[in-house]
Amino acid sequence: MTEKPDVNAAYALEGVEDVKALYRDWADTYDADFVTAMGYVYPQEVTRIFTERRETADAPVLDIGCGSGAVAEALPDPAEIDGLDLSPEMLRVAGAKGLYRRTVEGDLLARLPIPDDTYGALLSAGTFTHGHVGPQALDEVIRIARPGALFVLGINGAHFEEHGFGAAFTRLASAKRITTPDYVDCPVYADDSHDHADVRALVTVFRKT
């Protein structure tokens, strides 16, 4: 791609191939250019909520859209965590940090190469956002979760409203596939010096029934 990789380019993505191209070009500098430079605290917020809600049986953990591994880095004990991402280049960066048991390349909008009922907890920070994944991926992530599995899914606040996440969670809860979700508002960035400083997320917490 010719556009410089940044959060604006990420929000403007359209389709799987665009996502792959952006993160192929961004993987080696993502931590410095984005996580550090923009004060990206979203992974810490998601892992804080997970740590508050988790129980002993909530393992192993899957980091959905793990990117460069920021969620695993924020977890106090990442020993039983796997990373899933669409980008092989980002998985290479994440895997090199030695925090994941294994990394899995997969598309949330297709069938993942993961058996049913595999994970006891599923976390996500930064995947359910503009230009990335909408509520159509929820059925697939529920498929790979064990009954009783804990979900802590960060969803960009504007993306939540625009793409019908609320209606999707209501449908799933009404069908008794998940418990009624709790929603925790949180910041995405600590740095207030850039254009995206006021972005908020709704961390959606529920269990598979």
Image (spheres, helix red, strand yellow):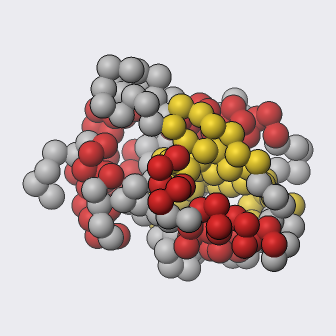
Going by the image, does 114 lie left or right of 171? Answer: left
Direction left: furthest residue = 2
Indicate the quadrant where residue 186 lies.
top right
Going by the image, does 76 lie left or right of 163? Answer: right
Going by the image, does 55 lie left or right of 44? Answer: right
Residue 99 makes an appearance in the image: no
Residue in the foreground of this view, choosing between 86 and 93: 86
**Whole-percent x, y for residue 179 in the image:** 84, 61
Direction bottom: furthest residue = 111
**Whole-percent x, y for residue 189 in the image:** 45, 29
**Whole-percent x, y for residue 141 in the image:** 64, 67
Identify whether 186 is placed above or below 123: above
Residue in the foreground of this view, choosing between 77 and 12: 12
Identify whether 53 is placed above or below 168: above
Indicate the quadrant where residue 198 lies.
top left
Identify whether 101 is placed above or below 71: below
Which quadrant is the C terminus positioned in? bottom right
Indicate the quadrant where residue 178 lies.
bottom right
